Image: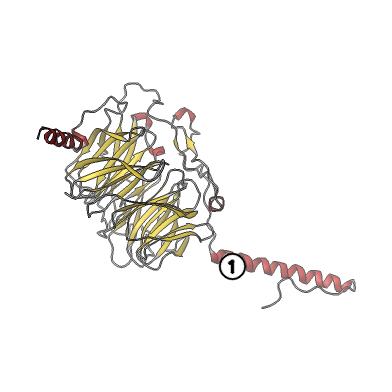
Amino acid sequence: LKCFFALYCHVRTMARPISSRIVRESAFRHVFGEASKECYQDIRYSTKATESAGVRGNELFVAIPWEAGGGGQLAVIAASNYGRLSQVGLPMIKGHAGGILDFEFNPFNPTQVLTACEDTKLRLWELPREGLKDSLVTPELAIDAHSKKLTFSTFHPTANLVCATAAFDLSIKVWNLETQGEIFATGVADQLQSLKWSPDGKLLAYTCKDKTLNIVDPRSPGTVHVEKSHEGTKAQKVEWLSNEALLTSGFSTQAERQVKMWSLANALECVNTELIDQGSGALYPTYDSDTKMLYLAGRGDGNVRFYEVDDSTFNIFPLSAFSTSNPAKGFDFLPKRCVDVGKKEVARALKVESSQVVPISFICPRKADAFQSDIYPDCLSGTPSISADEWGEGGNREPVRMSLDPAQQSGDDGAKSRTSSTIVTRADLIKQLDEAKAAVAELEAENSDFRKKLGLEPRPPTYPPE
């Protein structure tokens, strides 16, 4: 009986929520969240149920799905345009024949946004840098990506203009947007609940409704790992901690929210399970590999918990939480290059509430005014390290990183110095080919006249009439 009681106490101790454990010393021990007083107000947020983050942003824009009749609309707001939004005549991205289920900005070009729609099309939109003056109806390109409505679309982290999509036709596809060609396609066992690239862009991880975590190499379709993840029936999400470690969020059989950590060192295996709380909404994990901080935000939650991850022992340690009484309808983080190092901001997020989008700063207080290199290691620069063709042929390159030290900045806003990605559509290619053929025909006609004057036989045309 004593042995049984001791074992019971040990199990209960291990199963305690991590929020009840002692916090170790950390450089980020005193990080706190602070909601901005400048918000994007009077929004009409879409009621369409999706599994995506529900809001996206970068250094230039903030995007949210807008409630409207007919096809889906995306409101793209200039990042500096705080205050009340005009309910009448607000420029939108239109042209969708169904609801928008996912969208994402190009990490290498802040003026491009990708939308995945119920009408089975994948669309890429080009925005003016100064923001929309009129509604945008014609996309830069549109691809008939799947046979049923799309659920996810996400850009590759290192290759320019490569993206992955998932749909209700139980398939995942990887696209080269430059050529509008399909690089990879595979079937899945059940509907996807999340889809994420590994940091180096070699692998795709996804969770399914059948309670499994799956890893696939798009360029070697036979390399697949599948493991049962969480036993609960509600949505499960996945986030990469490194190229060989992942984290999933889900529910236990008792409907407790939990996170699991997974290692890919040998095979895919669960190395740690932690209880979070008894909340009802799915948790959306976001990991900052620069600070090794994990953020957990849930739809319907008013708080955002953040932790520090020890990637050597696969343990997570609670830091604090940002709490409000307003539940979140959507939540996502901006690229790390958007943080304000002057106010010691280590992360910046966007929270969608019932009628507004609220920027949230996560601040690590320091007395010194100088640049704090220990909390600001080099971050992703927003510059591609490899082309779509090179990646499709098996090439790999590490992500390009940059310093956040103002003394090492070029003086511009960062986005202006990035190379704009030019998309050439099939119609453009056909037009260019026709123009080239016409020019060749004109030159051959001149050559034929010249040969006649010399008494030479004319040559057959390079492009004979069809």
Query: Where in the figure is residue 259, as x and y percent of width and height?
Result: 27, 43
Picture layout, residue 466 above or below residue 3: below
Q: Amino acid at mark 1?
A: Ile
Q: Which residue is mark 1?
A: 430
Front residue of this view, candidates 276 and 440: 276
Residue placed furthest toward the right: 455
Pick the front one: 213 or 398: 213
Which quadrant does the C terminus fall into? bottom right
Query: In the drawing, does residue 212 fall left or right of residue 389?
Result: left
Give the residue at x 33% y 48%.
238
Residue in view at x 37 percent, y 55 percent: 103
Residue 116 higher or lower than 296, as above or below: below
Q: Is residue 239 above or below residue 345?
A: below
Examine the rendering and report whether any part of residue 404 can be seen.
yes
Q: Nearer the viewer, residue 354 or 397?
A: 397
- The image quadrant of residue 308 is top left
Circle 1 crowding by C-alpha within 10 Å: few under 14, some 14–19, many from 20: few
Measured as percent of width and height from the top left, residue 213 is found at: 33, 51
Counting from the top left corner in percent of width and height, residue 450 is at 84, 70
Residue farthest along the bottom direction in this orientation: 466
For residue 460, what is the image quadrant? bottom right
- At 36% across and 32% down in the image, what residue appears? 312
